[in-house]
């Protein structure tokens, strides 16, 4: 609940706004109330009864966040967490049935297709797809965002086969889009299904291509009572471990100048910065943008279903950060980041997932 964050909200609301320039939404829309400080002040006034969710501007403030956690990188107080506060507020807004119409429509679309993309998604065919299934010690949690990108799916299956790693597959949504929109109760059905699938698979490790899936499985599932019977890892961590064990040998190193984009949930949420770079340094000539690691720009993906114009401008800012490196290709470790940047950069710079270099 929002009141659980009261002491930290007070700290943030009385701060001299050192992080205000870090919020990509505030940078685009130039509104004080949607800076991290403005969000905290709004939350404080809600808790004090001076504002309510009946006010559309209050609701808009809680839904004007990418959940990128970039503000946290500039915060001088260790345990102030604006996205967590925003999440709690969104759940209260949904509970009060005051969510924006766009979010309500998003829920309806999700329930129709069991994913956030407005269409049926199926597991891509692959000539050497494992049929071992139950009994493998690794479960590949594909996730709905990877189902949109056959190249990422194929490259992941290929590297698992190359390493001689058996695996089973689970391809349903992890529930992140619902949870992040404030529909935590609706997301729990997906969590229960995933928990059962992991248990039935007999897996000891879960790997996923999607950082948001990894965060959900590792952090949010246990926090909501859906702790899993296996540990969750992002594919970059798994690849690095395979390399160290001598089970996976990378392709010959290329001299192509390559820039890496840190996905928000892989970096700022899971603190995984080094594993992708350790892999890339053995496969390409790595360049770093000016804003990188903890300070990296968000691609804007968390806004497209609600504020598409703002999201596009957030993406454009992130694109400029990539283009200034003059790199010849861009690599990321997130299917959604890849999709957003591929559409924005078009044919100017090829965009690939980390797994596609192996």
Image (tube, helix red, strand yellow):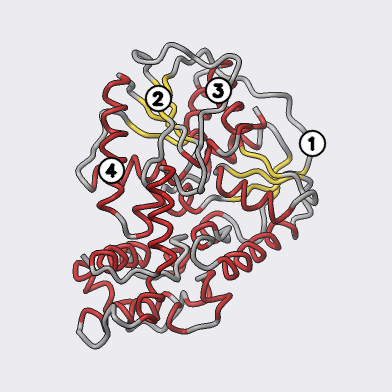
Q: Quadrant of residue 221?
A: top left
Count of picture labels: 4
Q: In terms of depth relative to the viewer, which is nearer, 232 or 193? A: 193
Residues at marks 3 and 1, CA–CA distance in whole angstroms: 26 Å
Where in the figure is residue 259, as x and y percent of width and height?
69, 48
Q: In terms of depth relative to the viewer, which is nearer, 238 or 25? A: 25
Residues at marks 2 and 4, CA–CA distance in whole angstroms: 16 Å
In the picture shown, does residue 66 fall above or below 197?
A: below
In the picture shown, does residue 263 fall above or below 90?
A: above
Where in the figure is residue 96, as x and y percent of width and height?
24, 69
Q: Quadrant of residue 9?
A: bottom left
> Is the N terminus in the top left, top right, bottom left or bottom right quadrant?
bottom left
Local secondary structure at mark 1: loop
Label 4: which residue? 221
Q: Earlier in the sequence, mark 2 or mark 1?
A: 2
Local secondary structure at mark 4: helix
Q: Is residue 258 left or right of residue 313?
A: right
Label 2: which residue? 139
Label 3: which residue? 157
Label 1: few (<14), some (14–19) or many (≥20) C-alpha neighbours in 10 Å: few
Q: In terms of depth relative to the viewer, which is nearer, 34 or 292? A: 34
Q: Are marks 3 and 4 in contact (CB under 8 Å)?
A: no
Where in the figure is residue 260, as x and y percent of width and height?
64, 47
Label 1: which residue? 255
């Amino acid at each position: 609940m929002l009141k659980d964050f009261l002491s930290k909200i007070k700290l943030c609301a009385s701060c001299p706004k050192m992080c205000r320039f870090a919020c990509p939404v505030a940078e685009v829309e130039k509104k004080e109330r949607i800076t991290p400080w403005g969000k905290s002040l709004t939350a404080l006034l809600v808790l004090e009864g001076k504002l309510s969710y009946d006010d559309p501007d209050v609701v808009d403030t809680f839904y004007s966040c990418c959940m990128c956690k970039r503000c946290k990188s500039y915060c001088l107080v260790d345990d102030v967490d604006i996205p967590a506060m925003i999440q709690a507020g969104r759940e209260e807004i949904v509970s009060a049935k005051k969510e924006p119409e766009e979010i309500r429509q998003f829920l309806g679309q999700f329930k129709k297709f069991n994913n956030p993309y407005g269409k049926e998604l199926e597991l891509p065919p692959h000539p050497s797809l494992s049929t071992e299934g139950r009994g493998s010690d690794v479960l590949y949690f594909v996730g709905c965002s990877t189902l949109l990108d056959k190249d990422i799916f194929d490259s992941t299956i290929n590297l698992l086969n190359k390493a001689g790693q058996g695996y089973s597959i689970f391809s349903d949504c992890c529930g992140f889009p619902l949870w992040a929109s404030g529909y935590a109760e609706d997301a729990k059905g997906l969590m229960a299904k995933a928990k059962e699938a992991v248990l039935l698979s007999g897996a000891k490790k879960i790997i996923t291509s999607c950082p948001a899936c990894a965060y959900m499985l590792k952090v949010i599932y246990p926090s909501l009572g859906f702790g899993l019977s296996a540990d969750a890892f992002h594919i970059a961590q798994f690849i690095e471990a395979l390399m160290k064990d001598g089970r996976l040998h990378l392709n010959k190193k290329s001299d192509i100048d390559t820039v890496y984009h840190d996905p928000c949930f892989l970096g700022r949420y899971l603190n995984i910065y080094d594993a992708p770079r350790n892999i890339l340094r053995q496969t390409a000539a790595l360049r770093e943008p000016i804003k990188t690691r903890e300070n990296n720009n968000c691609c804007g993906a968390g806004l497209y279903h609600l504020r598409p114009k703002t999201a596009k401008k957030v993406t454009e800012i992130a694109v400029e950060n990539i283009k200034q490196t003059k790199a010849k290709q861009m690599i990321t470790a997130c299917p959604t980041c890849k999709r957003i940047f591929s559409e924005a950069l078009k044919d100017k710079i090829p965009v690939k997932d980390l797994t596609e270099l192996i």
